[in-house]
Amino acid sequence: GKGGVNRDYSKAFEYFMKASNKGHKPASFYVSLCYGLGNGVRQDAKLSKQYRQLSGYNSIDNADKYLFSIEYVSSYPIR
């Protein structure tokens, strides 16, 4: 990564999952992104959707934010 820090998506996923399991909604959102992008975990659309729902990003406005986040993180347009 930048600044001499290596990215460890598996470790990030582990911490996001721990926080999500404790009810932390923003962490559930990041778990959803990890599953959606396959970062640190096997890509799984069903689990991505499940954790997105747990995060509260279910409305149309929030869904747009979710899609934008995936596009931003992956630099890949999905719409």
Image (cartoon, grey):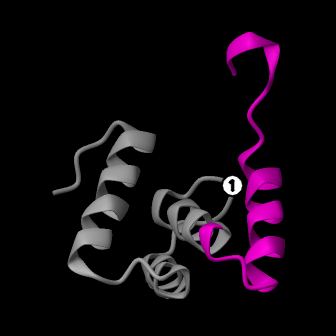
| Mark 1: few/some/many CA within 10 Å (<14, 14-19, 20+) | some
Q: Main secondary structure of the magenta part?
A: helix
Q: Which quadrant, please, contains the C terminus?
A: bottom left
Judge whether residue 19 is colored magenta: yes
Can you identify the residue that label 1 sits on? 40
Q: Which quadrant, please, contains the N terminus?
A: top right
Residue 37: image x %, image y %? 48, 57
Residue at the location (54% across, 79% down)?
55
Vertical arrangement, residue 8 with respect to residue 10, above or below: above
70 relative to 40 in the view: left or right: left
Residue at the location (53% across, 70% down)?
32
Residue 18: image quadrant is: bottom right
In this orientation, which residue lies closer to the viewer: 30 or 6? 30
Residue at the location (60% across, 53% down)?
39
Q: Secondary structure at mark 1?
A: loop
Q: Which residues are magenta?
A: 1-26
